[in-house]
């Protein structure tokens, strides 16, 4: 192994509210190598990286960059020490253009704005990304924002790039682009820290792996390929149960969702001729993000415009959102940060998601805590306290809170969009099990997911959505990844 | 040791407030010193006004608590209500008029609340339906009420004998005073504190308050859960107007009984309420002590001039510094929430 660029020694982090997120962690990052950092939800991965970036300070421990011990007081210090961090949700100023965002970053890095063109050209060569300089960030899709985020870091001369669950919001094609960019950066000798829950990605791109568990290192710099996915998963979370066998020949009941001649418009126009979900079945909707899933879901739940045709939920035509939940619907949106009030407490968020449509008039703290206990226990949500702001939960625990709030309603129709996004291997399995269990107890589930494995694992039927149309409905036996891929791409 | 987040937050917030207060007091003493007055005595005078004039401090506290709530409530949904000033004056005017004409206390209060609710509710409806900026509309409404009040006071309600003021509300439409610890104070304070406690319960313990606060914190989520965001926003404005209108009405039937022809008896309660709301972090319970502190300082600053011969403005300056120091953190948060309220489509 070459000399490390960055070395973290004995990092301990106790958050102000007393949560011990890291308990003596060592980590080294090497030039030109991808170091995957794995661990279950809440293991402390993001915390460790925020410390390296200078966003938060360690309670104890040393940060050594290029052999020198440094003290990072803010992200500006991190950036000036050649560290760049790309969060799952790119932290760009939405109302500014790409160019302005890059210049803002250069300002933090202490780089002359005149060098923009030249440096950006270099960064584009390395990563293969390009950036629409004069577009406003809020008009760009997430994938492009992430490219901008990476580009500006590299352009500012970062030698260490931290990627925190970078592929969760990307389409397969975008993932490929990212992998190519990573290879380019490796050739440049940039050190990469790569956080993910997706083990196939680790196999593909990681040179070495460190596994965290409850704030401690349980495996340091191991070779992913000699361990295999199974071995890695075991290190992360212990034994992972295999997916439960699918029930065959289930008896399906009445339709819980019927769609007929529906035309809806959001970012794109969607037309659904016929679609039915029956009691007892999981209908998977596969497709590349942005092909009409959002519009379809908005029309079903009722917060999106329905231009023509109708949606029937549990016998009710075109329900309003309030009616949708009241008659037994539940909804897990694809982006938890859009669903939660990040500065409100865990208990308040939970009570809101559970009771917004209908609930007891009085929601006393006692009642909130009781609800929290119930959901936290059942769905294994780990939070410092029910009154901690939801922002302080790890990404996976936020997701479990959202899922739990909806399953707690005991819905008869569940609309779930990417319900396991950001969850670790074991929790993913667990949530998929919950969804399948819901269906086997007689509810209907519309599972919209960009993750083909997820679709194939739990669906009883699979509809493929492409450019706002249902391109085909298949049984799991017919649905090979190739066939699905072809339909998703718009073929027949 | 685990530090429980809720109590930890209360402790840190309390320390913050005490720190700001200490800085404000020191700054006040420096100003007094520069003006050539004995610093400790000046501050002592300002802070002990509640002992000298308990009735006046009680009345101010009652009024400012209500107008502060009038600012705080819509802010929880993301709206800035500058209209408490106008609603207070309109509430006072209608209560006086109706109380004078009918002789009924209840009718007077009801009229004051209704007038305030309609006034600010209008601004709320304009914001929700037509995206008219509520800051501008409430400021405009304030001016309309300002001139309307002067016009009606002079043309309709002026007293025949005491020409510097309007007629008084009759005995039957007055709110009695209460005795407390050897002195007598207006019972408006009891009503005001009662209303704020109820409001706190609604905001913090009721589903209604949770939904209302979520409309300000996360509009998208509210919409997808079937919460009528526009209704909550417009409704919070109407309720805010009701609170300020109630304050104005209480002021007439419980304290001033008439309005002077310049209208000065009913002015600035609404604007001062904004500062009180921010000092109280927009929390109805915290607003009560904030209103008391503000009132104490306000009344006390009036005594600084006659006793120490320093200009009245020195007292105002000291009040201003303390209020700004205490209100600043919440003011930033408030601005952020306000900006957020314009982001999501309609409403
Ligand atoms: N700002 C914060 N305040 C208090 N506790 C926090 C804060 N941020 C994180 N935590 C806690 O620290 C622990 C580690 O969180 P972290 O976000 O680092 O986990 P993670 O490994 O990134 O998990 P995930 O895979 O779910 O994203 C969790 O228990 C979390 O609740
Ligand atoms: Mg994380």
Image: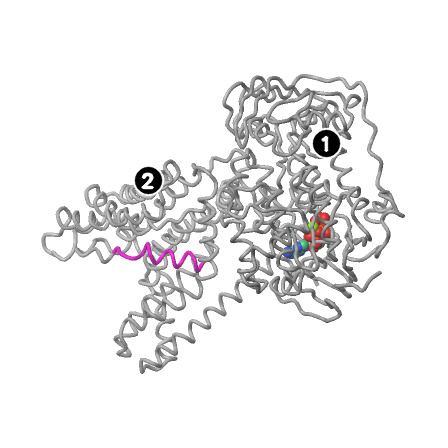
Determine which of the numbered discs, if any, sits on residue B122 in the image: 2
Report the magenta stretch's main SS: helix
Please, is residue A318 above or below residue B336 in the view? above
Q: Nearer the viewer, residue B221 or A206?
A: A206
Measured as percent of width and height from the top left, residue A18 is found at 68, 60
Question: Around disc 2, counting alpha carbons within 10 Å, would you say few (fewer than 14), some (14 to 19), or many (20 or more)?
Answer: many
Measured as percent of width and height from the top left, residue A177 is found at 69, 42
Please state the chain letter of the residue tagged with numbered disc 2 in the rendered image: B
Measured as percent of width and height from the top left, residue B335 is found at 44, 53
Q: In the rendered structure, does residue B272 fall within the stretch colored magenta? A: yes
Q: Is residue A182 visible?
A: yes
Residues at marks 2 and 1 on the same chain: no
Measured as percent of width and height from the top left, residue A410 is found at 67, 31
Residue at 78%, 37% in the rendered image = A429
Q: Which residues are magenta?
A: B266-280
Question: Which residue is identified by label 1?
Answer: A435
Answer with the quarter of the image where residue A13 lies. Answer: bottom right
Q: Secondary structure at mark 2?
A: helix
Q: CA distance from mark 2 to mark 1?
A: 47 Å
């Amino acid at each position: 192994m070459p000399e490390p660029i960055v070395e973290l020694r004995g990092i301990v982090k106790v958050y102000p509210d007393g949560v011990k997120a890291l308990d003596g962690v060592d980590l080294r990052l090497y030039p030109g190598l991808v170091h995957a950092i794995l661990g279950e939800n809440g293991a402390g991965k993001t915390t460790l990286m925020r410390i390296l970036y200078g966003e938060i300070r360690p309670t104890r421990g040393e940060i050594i960059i290029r052999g020198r011990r440094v003290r990072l007081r803010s992200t500006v210090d991190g950036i000036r020490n050649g560290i760049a961090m790309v969060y799952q949700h790119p932290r760009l100023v939405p109302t500014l253009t790409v160019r302005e965002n890059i210049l803002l970053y250069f300002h933090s890095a202490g780089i002359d704005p005149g060098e923009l063109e030249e440096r950006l050209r270099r960064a584009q060569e390395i990563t293969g990304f390009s950036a629409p300089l004069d577009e406003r960030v809020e008009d760009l899709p997430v994938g492009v924002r992430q490219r901008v985020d990476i580009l500006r870091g590299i352009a500012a001369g970062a030698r260490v790039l931290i990627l925190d669950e970078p592929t969760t919001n990307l389409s397969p094609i975008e993932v490929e682009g990212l992998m190519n960019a990573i290879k380019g950066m490796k050739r440049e000798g940039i050190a990469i820290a790569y956080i993910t829950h997706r083990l196939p990605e680790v196999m593909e791109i990681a040179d070495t792996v460190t596994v965290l568990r409850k704030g401690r290192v349980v495996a340091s710099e191991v070779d992913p390929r000699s361990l295999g996915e199974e071995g890695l998963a075991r290190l992360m979370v212990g034994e992972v149960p295999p997916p439960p066998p699918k029930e065959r020949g289930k008896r399906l009941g009445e339709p819980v969702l019927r769609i007929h001649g529906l035309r809806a418009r959001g970012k794109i126009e969607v037309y659904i001729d016929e679609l039915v979900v029956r009691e007892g079945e999981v209908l998977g909707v596969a497709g590349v993000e942005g092909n009409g899933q959002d519009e379809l879901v908005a029309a079903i739940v009722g917060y999106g415009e329905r231009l023509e045709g109708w949606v029937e939920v549990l016998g009710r035509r075109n329900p309003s959102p309030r009616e949708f939940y009241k008659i037994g619907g539940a909804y897990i949106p694809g982006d938890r940060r859009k669903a939660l009030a990040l500065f409100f407490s865990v208990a308040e968020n939970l009570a809101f998601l559970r009771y917004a449509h209908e609930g007891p008039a009085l929601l006393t703290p006692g009642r909130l805590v009781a609800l929290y206990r119930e959901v936290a226990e059942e769905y294994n949500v780990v939070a410092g306290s029910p009154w901690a702001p939801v922002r302080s939960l790890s990404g996976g625990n936020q997701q479990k809170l959202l899922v739990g709030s909806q399953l707690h309603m005991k819905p008869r129709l569940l609309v779930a969009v990417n319900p396991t996004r950001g969850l670790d291997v074991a929790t993913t399995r667990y949530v998929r099990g919950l969804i399948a269990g819901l269906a086997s107890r007689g509810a209907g589930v519309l599972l919209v997911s960009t993750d083909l494995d997820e679709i194939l694992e739990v669906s009883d039927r699979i509809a493929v959505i492409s450019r706002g149309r249902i391109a085909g409905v298949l049984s799991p036996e017919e649905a090979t990844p190739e066939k699905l891929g072809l339909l998703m791409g718009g073929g027949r | 040791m685990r530090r429980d987040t809720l109590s930890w937050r209360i402790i840190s917030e309390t320390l913050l407030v005490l720190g700001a207060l200490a800085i404000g007091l020191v700054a006040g003493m420096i100003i007094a010193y520069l003006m050539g007055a004995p610093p400790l005595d000046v501050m002592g005078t300002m802070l002990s006004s509640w002992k000298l004039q308990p009735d006046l401090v009680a009345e101010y506290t009652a009024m400012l608590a209500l107008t502060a709530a009038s600012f705080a409530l819509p802010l929880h949904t993301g709206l800035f209500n500058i209209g408490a000033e106008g609603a207070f004056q309109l509430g006072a005017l209608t209560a006086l008029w109706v109380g004078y004409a009918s002789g009924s206390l209840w009718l007077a209060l009801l009229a004051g609340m209704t007038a305030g609710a309609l006034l600010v509710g209008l601004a709320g409806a304009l914001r929700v339906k037509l995206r008219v900026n509520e800051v501008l509309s409430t400021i405009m409404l304030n001016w309309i009420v300002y001139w309307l009040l002067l016009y009606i006071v002079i043309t309709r309600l002026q007293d025949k004998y005491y020409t510097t003021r309007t007629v008084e509300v009759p005995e039957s439409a007055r709110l009695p005073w209460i005795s407390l610890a050897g002195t007598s104070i207006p019972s408006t304070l009891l009503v005001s504190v009662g209303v704020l406690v109820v409001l706190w319960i609604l905001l913090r313990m009721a589903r209604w308050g949770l939904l209302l606060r979520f409309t300000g914190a996360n509009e998208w989520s509210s919409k997808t859960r079937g919460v009528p965001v526009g209704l909550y926003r417009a409704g919070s404005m109407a309720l805010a107007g009701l609170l300020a209108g109630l304050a104005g009405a209480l002021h007439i039937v419980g304290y001033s009984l008439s309005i002077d022809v310049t209208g000065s008896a009913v002015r600035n309660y609404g604007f001062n309420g904004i500062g009180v709301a921010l000092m109280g972090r927009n929390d109805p319970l915290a607003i009560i002590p904030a209103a008391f502190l503000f009132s104490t300082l306000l009344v006390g600053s009036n005594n600084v001039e006659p006793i120490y011969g320093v200009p009245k403005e020195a007292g105002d300056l000291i009040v201003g510094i303390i209020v700004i120091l205490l209100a600043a953190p919440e003011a930033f948060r408030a601005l952020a929430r306000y900006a957020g309220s314009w982001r999501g489509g309609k409403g």
